[in-house]
Amino acid sequence: ETGVTQTPRHLVMGMTNKKSLKCEQHLGHNAMYWYKQSAKKPLELMFVYNFKEQTENNSVPSRFSPECPNSSHLFLHLHTLQPEDSALYLCASSQVTPAGANVLTFGAGSRLTVL
Amino acid sequence: AQKVTQAQTEISVVEKEDVTLDCVYETRDTTYYLFWYKQPPSGELVFLIRRNSFDEQNEISGRYSWNFQKSTSSFNFTITASQVVDSAVYFCALRRISNFGNEKLTFGTGTRLTIIP
């Protein structure tokens, strides 16, 4: 496996369900990210983890709960979602260095539909 | 506050035509990075280029070229002799440079490019 892998690629869930999205990076990077991509909106940064520590929570509702057990894995736990949460959720990783370019490598995304 | 504007929501051109995707940005920072990413139908964003605000030289990579104009805050992307495989959504993005090294990327809303065979 190479790059950034996301599972599942597609998920349909009811508003009362609990599910999780998984992201794994095989690049040896020290930072991981969750982005939300909705139609006709800029990509929205949700969470950032540096060295497994959460460094940014971009005012995300508590029904989204991230988990980063190590620098290679990132989860997004979902519970009691709303239909407006339907979107493509993209995971990314990067190697963060001071004043560095910090180019993000993205996964293919998990397409979430909330009924 | 930082902002990236991609005014072209959708563009369609016939194969082999040249096409330019516009990107205009706003920032109060004097140093920053600019990026272009490509999102094909498979979903993942693919990194195309990073440009440092110190370097205003235009860049060419094969059929791709980028025109960075600091005076007009623009970073336009041109595809020459377009091909069907170029069909994708293209995103322009901006990030400040700091010693922290992990500043937030600000993305535009993207331009959907369709190349017609």
Image (tube, rainbow, N blue to C red):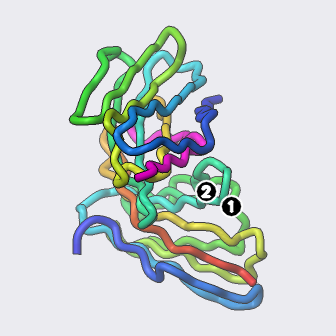
Would you call the spot at circle 1 few (<14 residues within 10 Å), some (14-19), or many (20 or more)?
Answer: few
- What residue type is disc 1 on? Val
Using the image, name the chain to which the residue with label 1 belongs.
Answer: A
Q: Secondary structure at mark 1?
A: loop
Asked whether the residues under marks 2 and 1 belong to the same chain, the reply is yes
- What residue type is disc 2 on? Asn
Residue B109, magenta (yes or no): yes
x, y (%) of residue B80? 33, 33
Q: CA distance from mark 2 to mark 1?
A: 6 Å
- Residue at x 47% of width, y 79% of height: A9
Magenta residues, as a range?
B101-117
- Residue at x 44% of width, y 43% of height: B14
- Residue at x 62% of width, y 47% of height: A42
Are the residues flagged by discs 2 and 1 in contact, CB closer than 8 Å? yes
Residue A60's mark?
Answer: 1
Q: Say if B102 sits above or below B39 in the image.
A: above
Residue A57's mark?
Answer: 2
